[in-house]
Image (spheres, coloured by chain):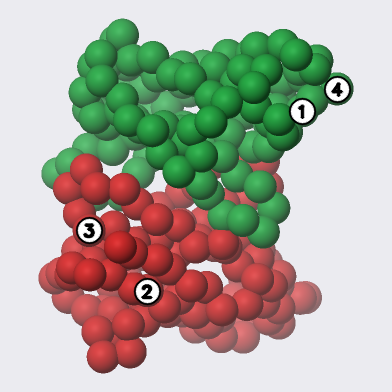
Amino acid sequence: DGGITQSPKYLFRKEGQNVTLSCEQNLNHDAMYWYRQDPGQGLRLIYYSQIVNDFQKGDIAEGYSVSREKKESFPLTVTSAQKNPTAFYLCASRDISKYGYTFGSGTRLTVV
Amino acid sequence: AQSVTQLGSHVSVSEGALVLLRCNYSSSVPPYLFWYVQYPNQGLQLLLKYTSAATLVKGINGFEAEFKKSETSFHLTKPSAHMSDAAEYFCAVSPGGYQKVTFGTGTKLQVIP
């Protein structure tokens, strides 16, 4: 079955460390997105990519970086510059002809 | 510019009662509208979408929503709540295409036995 795979499901980061969250899709979708979810704040867009080797900042890109070297993959790096990284991170992809997003199951990042 | 307002961060209903989750939108162009459901520690699943066809949209799990342009609303309803409906529900709006989708802050639905 096609879908989006996020790994790991749980991730712990020490202060000052960079960590990378994986997102892989086999849906052949062109567009991919990263959202951050905090209680009571809904989903906030971090970065998105509409095509390989191109990506744009979302609403809260500071402290994050991404790459899009392959259509299937859109990893997110949470850098040490992100002061409050503890959150639930969701990856999504989109087929322009079908509207809506397909979401992965998320990665919960905790700073220890 | 676009935005979504979900009225009520928490809604409680009795099992078998009507479910009504409210969503009002703001959009400078004809919008595409969505409802998603999220179970704890999981991703979001698309319940239904409005894409300028019929104003009454039917989705999965017995949910439906009606697009009312005059009220700028897209409320989600289900005639009879089931225990398995307990989850968080998100309304979202997009101008279409690859344009950004903007999500509301979510409504947690509690179903009381």
Give the amino acid type for the residue marked by disc 3 in the picture. Answer: Pro
Residue under pointer 4: A112
Query: What distance separates the C-alpha of mark 3 from that of mark 2?
Result: 12 Å
Q: Residue at x 34, y 73 (%)?
A: B26
- The image shows residue A56, relative to residue A37, as above or below, that is above
Image quarter for residue B23? Answer: bottom left
Q: Chain of mark 1?
A: A
Mark 2: few, some, or many residues within 10 Å (few <14, many ≥20)?
many
**Who's red, chain-wise?**
B
Q: Chain of mark 3?
A: B
Q: Quadrant of the N terminus of chain A?
A: top left
Residue under pointer 1: A110
Q: Residue furthest right?
A: A112
In the rendered structure, are the residues bearing label 4 and label 1 in contact, judged by CB atoms less than 8 Å apart?
yes
Residue A33, x across and y down, in percent: 39, 34
In the rendered structure, are the residues bearing label 3 and label 2 in contact, judged by CB atoms less than 8 Å apart?
no
Q: Quadrant of the C terminus of chain A?
A: top right
Query: What distance separates the C-alpha of mark 2 from that of mark 1?
Result: 33 Å
Residue under pointer 2: B25
Which mark is drawn over residue B95?
3
In the rendered structure, are the residues bearing label 4 and label 3 in contact, judged by CB atoms less than 8 Å apart?
no
In the rendered structure, are the residues bearing label 1 and label 3 in contact, judged by CB atoms less than 8 Å apart?
no
Q: Residue at x 62, y 77 (%)?
A: B8
Q: Are marks 3 and 2 on the same chain?
A: yes
Front residue of A50 and A7: A50
Front residue of B35 and B106: B106
Q: Are marks 2 and 1 on the same chain?
A: no
Query: What distance separates the C-alpha of mark 1 from that of mark 3?
Result: 34 Å
Mark 1: few, some, or many residues within 10 Å (few <14, many ≥20)?
some
Q: Are marks 1 and 3 on the same chain?
A: no
Residue A51, x across and y down, in percent: 21, 23
Give the amino acid type for the residue marked by disc 1 in the picture. Answer: Thr
